[in-house]
Amino acid sequence: MDVYETLPIVPLRDVVVFPHMMMPFVIGRPSSTRALEHALTKDKRIFLAAQQDAATDDPQPKDIYTMGCIANIVQSLKLPDGNVKVLVEGLTRARAIEWKEDKGFYRVVAKLLPKQDETSDDVASTMSRVVSLFEQYVKLSNNLHYDAMIAAARVDDANRLADTIAAHLVVSVEEKQNLLEIISPLERLVRIASLLEIEVDKLQVDRGIQSRVKKQMEKAQKEYYLNEKMKAIQKELGRKEDKGNELDELKKKIEQARMPKEAEEKASQELKRLEGMPPMSAEATVSRNYLDWLIAVPWYKRSRESRNLKKAERILHEDHYGLDKVKDRILEFLAVRKLVRKPKGTILTFTGPPGVGKTSLAKSIARATNRKFVRLSVGGVRDEAEVRGHRRTYIGAFPGQIIQMMKKAGTVNPVFLLDEVDKMSMDFRGDPSAALLEVLDPEQNHTFLDHYLDVEYDLSNVMFICTANVLHTVPQALRDRMEVLQLAGYTEFEKTEIAKTFLTPKAVKANGLTVKNIQFKNEAFETIIQRYTREAGVRNLEREINAICRKVARKVVDEGKQFSDEITAGQVTEHLGVPRYRPTMLEEKNEIGIATGLAWTEAGGELLFTEATLMPGKGRLTLTGQLGDVMQESAKAAMSYVRSRAEEFGIQKDFHHRTDIHVHIPEGAIPKDGPSAGITLATALVSNLAGVPTRRDVAMTGEITLRGKVLPIGGLKEKVLAAHRAGVTTIILPKDNEKDLADIPKAVLDVLELHLVESMDEVLKIALVSPLTALLPSQDQPDSQISSSDDQVTH
């Protein structure tokens, strides 16, 4: 028989009340308060049901679940704020059948749902399983008291067990409402078991995570404690405390760096990785270093370039004497920059002997253009990673020298000097000159990729300047990307002017002297240049001037600041000692078998004296003086030419049957090579065999062919300057080298007598003291006499 009861209803937010459950809650809504007061005046019984939506403030019957619980009001307490705190005990399930509105609250006709008793084996086993799962659940849960919960769960009634456990499960209101609406205790227990299995799994996962987090937290707390202790110690010692959040500072710096999009994305990504790393880990240090490099490299900052041609010309003349061709090229570059907004990058290469001012000229260019200057010496570099950097996978990886120098410059448009590019080498670690191909190619260097940064970097605004002593050691592909400007050696006049204008004031200042203490005469400079230095540049000249200044500085200290000395040619010897070099014009008279040639060296031009002598023998040609293969072949070609023209030169045509010839080029410790000594060797041979002396004041250079043609040679400027330094007045040059005379200073050309020749006949007319007389047929030995003489030798 169904039982009905009319009771006031109180809708509950986020709470489901089960039978056999004690539940405290607070009532605040006026309708709920009136319903409670009505119940208290009667038998203290009330109907409790959950709202479908907890956010509804004034719920209507449709907003409340029909299945609820009839409860007994155990205790009520009115609070100062007007709310009422209530403690109720659930009695039995009931379903609302009919709703009645009564004086500001609802009453419902509730149908009581009697509990079902089941005692089958399935119920017993399910109860045992649920109790076991609930014990695990309570152990893992931090919100439930273990002893109280286990005591509450030790009951024999399936209904009571199911409702007790359901009341204490931490699940959603909807799930609890579902359990309330299941009448069958077996079904309810099965559902509770499945829920408990899910919750136990969740708690076990949470416990594992919590354990790991706890370990990390303990480690982090330990590190934090030690760091704070270190800070306190540092503060006590008076050291500066590291303030501010490092990550925030890095983020701010990344924003201020104005990187390209790709680089900024990479930096932001690395910063996110860094945020998730322990601060003291090795990986965090690597990431922080990488970010520091990305931020430190200039991405947009540039020097304000000076394009004032007059000012640039003045600066170049202030810093260097001569070098007009190079200065003109720099001014042309600036003129183009003034007309074109963004011209292509320029790669200039200064090549010439040591000490002619290649490196200092690059500094002057930076000063003239108002750009930053950085210098990278690549001499001896043999590892490609020096240019491109190491990948970050390696311990201690760093960017390459190109990026390091850009960081040092701090701008995107410096003057970048690559010094000694001819002295790079290669081994198993790679070829650095191949890596430089990308750097020095204006078509590619706007996307230069350093292995460490791993983002493209724009080098197109950089003005690259390379220096080299020779170009034949530079790979062809790299040479093709360079605009080569030759810096030949200085003339004596130029060296004197450089010493007077630049070197002496610098040396006087460096040694603490004044112009009153020391003055140099021009003859003193000439003596130093001729007798104490032998070079194309002025490095040794500067060294000797400094040596003299030091001697005078000592006298100033000994005799007082009023001491003054005027340096003459005689005093140079007194200060510097015995001259190191004798005059290069060694021959005091015209001699047979000696010819003066001209040679090119890395230090500039040199005179090359060639000696030939005859000895009885069988026509053997001996070559000494450390001659290279090409030079030996030139000597053989000269010998063949002389033999083919012997009668025309007044030489017995069978001279080689009875005579050995020895050709020697002095200074035998120095290796010599090249074809340009061909006409010098031929002249020495003809002079010796014909017995005609050569002129001591004539020097020559040129390659010889078997037909006696004179072919062009290289290094003409250096050779002519060497002859001029040595006091030679007449020089024989190949006709095809006439175009190269434009590079020689006019002051030198005016004092030299130059002969441009095409054949060996012209050379001999100039080089020999007297013309050669051809042999008459009667002067030559008849064939019959030669054979009879041979016969006598045989007999």
Image: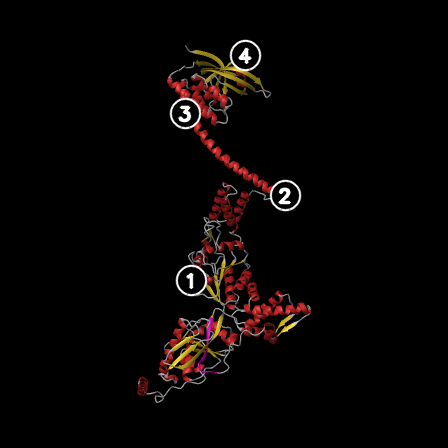
Q: Nearer the viewer, mark 3 or mark 4?
A: 3
Q: Nearer the viewer, mark 4 or mark 1?
A: 1
Q: Amino acid at mark 3?
A: Ser
Q: Which quadrant, please, contains the C terminus?
A: bottom left
Tell me the crowding category of disc 1: few under 14, some 14 to 19, or many 20 or more residues within 10 angstroms, Cα based: some
Tell me the crowding category of disc 2: few under 14, some 14 to 19, or many 20 or more residues within 10 angstroms, Cα based: few
Q: Amino acid at mark 4?
A: Thr
- Determine which residue is flagged by label 2: 236
Q: Residue furthest front?
A: 795
- Determine which residue is flagged by label 4: 41
Circle nearer the N terminus (3, 1): 3
> Magenta residues?
590-600
From mark 3 to mark 4, how far is it between C-alphas?
43 Å
Tell me the crowding category of disc 3: few under 14, some 14 to 19, or many 20 or more residues within 10 angstroms, Cα based: few
Numbered disc 1: secondary structure: loop
Mark number displayed over residue 475: 1
- Determine which residue is flagged by label 3: 194
In the image, is residue 668 part of the stretch drawn in magenta? no
Mark number displayed over residue 69: none
Tell me the crowding category of disc 4: few under 14, some 14 to 19, or many 20 or more residues within 10 angstroms, Cα based: few
Q: Position of residue 347 (x, y in %)?
A: 47, 61
Numbered disc 3: secondary structure: helix
Q: Amino acid at mark 2?
A: Glu
What residue sits 60% from the left and 20% below the top? 80
